[in-house]
Image (cartoon, rainbow, N blue to C red):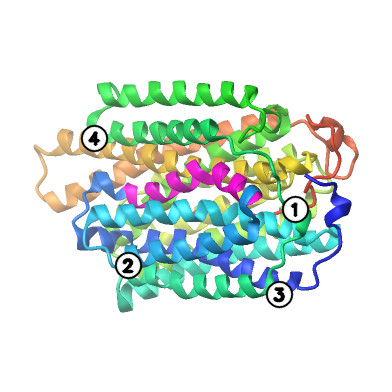
Amino acid sequence: MPKSADISVPDPSRWKALVFIAVAQLMVVLDATIVNIALPTAQQDLGISDANRQWVITAYALAFGGLLLFGGRIADLWGRKRTFIVGLLGFAAASALGGAATSEALLLGSRALQGAFGALLAPAALSLLAVMFTDAKERAKAFGIYGAIAGGGGAVGLILGGFLTEYLNWRWTFFVNIPFAIVAAVGAYLVIREPEGARNRSSLDIPGVVLSTLGLVALVYGFTRAESAGWSDSLTVGMFVASVVLLAGFVVTEAKVKSPLLPLRVLTERNRGGVYLSLGLAIIAMFGLFLFLTFYLQVVKGYSPVRTGFAFLPMIAGMITGSTQIGARLMTRVPPRLLMGPGFLVAATGMLMLTQLEIGSSYAGLILPAQVLLGLGMGTAFMPAMSLATHGVNPADAGVASAMVNTSQQVGGAIGTALLNTIAASATTAYVTSHAAGAANPKLLELQAMVHGFSSAIWWAVGILVSAAAIAFTLINTGRPGAGSVTAASGDGIEGGIDEIKVPVVAH
């Protein structure tokens, strides 16, 4: 990588480029939340079983998370602009395939393809912003806009998903991506001028790509299979063993190869390691909750898709408020752990309220205040986490550090959906078995069992969030940004990097 001075001349079209990069980001965010709302309708239409419905979410998150490090390295080697455009066009094609799906297999395959192309698109977009905005103040403003779209896009996706599902068809929640992708791709081709010296010319770590991707796939598949076959099933255990072996092999490989996919120095610095671990755990809790609340509101409470979309707005509003009004204002005044730890505990309090869910629970009395607490807590914690995750890294590692943040979120989401869905399904089955004899109304028993399963899994989510808070308090020991201690705490000891980036991220 060249020194930053070689690429420090501001790009005259950088603000126009930001528009098209933001459109691409909006599309990715829309896709995640839109599909959540459409899932019950799509499940019924294509005859997807309860055990397999989570794969509509998991297939996307797994492909995205498993290939993000690879996508980030491809962008470095192949060119960020080219990778960005290919990612957009591939995402559009995968969305068209999903919208036209006539079977469960085709829908799941299209979701995996969306995730794969998203893994090309996301790190390329972040890298383009990092190399095009070289002034610290401009870069902070650009990433602020990018982050605001990540937050606001979640709300737009929930509402738009509801309208499309209710008034058109669930298939339009896929087709809507196509115009976004085409506009962003054409605009990027015409406007973006990637700096000449911005590429990393190191070779591609093929063994690292294979080991990391297969290891993550085995890990999530193990959690998913546990639901139908049980934790002691030989294939379930085999998947967990395989994931440990593959990921251990990945670590050994990265320590020895000349140009590692993930330089271990990015992970071993305690503050960044603490961010990746606590953030991944928090996302595990949040992803499961989104799935449960969607089905609770539509199946148990009888909400329409549009009403369900609006019902999620308090959580999104809480996230935006927590990140922009609390996290952003305090992160230059207090150490990150004093925002992240309490933030996760506030979110855990909101999650704790949802353990009291019953068939007749009041939205205004229980679900709304719980969502507000969840959103405020997660938003407050995410803001300093995003900044700290890339603080003080070698500029040559900045892309992979950003990709690692996304990887911890996407893999956490995949594990969260699989793990919590498994716990909920097991609790639901146990409830039906123990109450079936005296049940006068089978439909009522089914709903009671479903809600019991949800609340049982949410208890686990509470524990996971408390664990995330404990990790943040324990591992993250750096001072507030700008106090001089952050760079000193960096394992690389290299000043610069992209420490100005502060991107709030919304869990979907």
4 or 2: tag closer to the N-terminus: 2
Query: Farthest residue in the bottom direction?
Result: 167
Residue receiving disc 2: 99
Q: Amino acid at mark 4?
A: Ser
Q: Is residue 211 left or right of residue 503?
A: left
Residue 198 point in image, percent of width and height? 75, 53
Numbered badge on residue 198:
1
Q: Residues within 10 Å of mark 4 (few under 14, many from 20)?
A: some
Residue 398 point in image, percent of width and height? 72, 44
Residue receiving disc 4: 228
Marks 4,2: beta carbons within 8 A: no
Q: Amino acid at mark 1?
A: Ala
Marks 3 and 2, how far apart at CA:
31 Å
User: With respect to residue 381, does 474 lie above or below?
Assistant: above
Numbered badge on residue 320:
none
Q: Amino acid at mark 3?
A: Lys
Give the mark toward the camera: 1 or 3: 1
Residue at 37%, 57% in the rendered image? 294
Q: Is residue 12 left or right of residue 293?
A: right
Residue 292 point in image, percent of width and height? 37, 50
1 or 3: tag closer to the N-terminus: 3
Q: Residues within 10 Å of mark 1 (few under 14, many from 20)?
A: many
Numbered badge on residue 16:
3
Marks 3,2: beta carbons within 8 A: no
Mark 1, secondary structure of its residue: helix
